[in-house]
Amino acid sequence: MVVTFHDGQAHFVVHDDLRDLLTAGEARVRRASHVTPVSRGLRWLFTALRARVTDTSALAGWTRRWPCRWQADLSPVGGPVIGPFTDRQAAIAAEIDWIEEHVL
């Protein structure tokens, strides 16, 4: 877990252990990437479903468990698309490593 400070602002990957920092003052959360299936068809379905439900819904949870190859698109922070990974958790771990090394 990496937290950097620049001009009095803290920058970090949102993680459950750091959620209290979001309520300690003014907070702005910015998406750094999108973790999605590699398959174009599954990626389309994943994106369509996730646009219509909350992140905490049962349907969103189901999409996170799909047994497919996953990728992390880091273009929101000027990065590459990395992957494929055998599961979503591996894609998220690589995504966090990349962000901590190149952004934070």
Image (cartoon, rainbow, N blue to C red):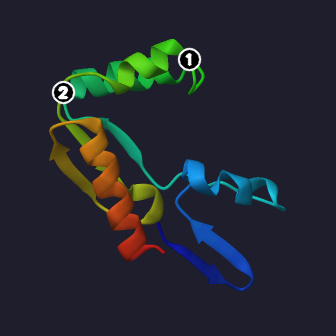
Q: Quadrant of residue 86?
A: top left
Residue in view at x 72 percent, y 60 percent: 21
Of 44 and 30, nearer the camera is 30
The image shows residue 73 at horizontal and vertical percentages of 34, 50
The number of callouts visible is 2
Q: Is residue 23 left or right of residue 83?
A: right
Of 85 and 17, nearer the camera is 17
Amino acid under disc 1: Ser
Q: Is residue 7 left or right of residue 77?
A: right
Q: Earlier in the sequence, mark 2 or mark 1?
A: 1
Residue 88 sits above or below residue 83 on the image: above
The image shows residue 48 at horizontal and vertical percentages of 44, 20
Residue in view at x 45 percent, y 73 percent: 103
The secondary structure type at the circle numbered 1 is loop
Q: Which residue is mark 2?
A: 68
Amino acid under disc 2: Cys
The image's mark for residue 57 is 1
The secondary structure type at the circle numbered 2 is loop
Q: Is residue 59 left or right of residue 54?
A: left
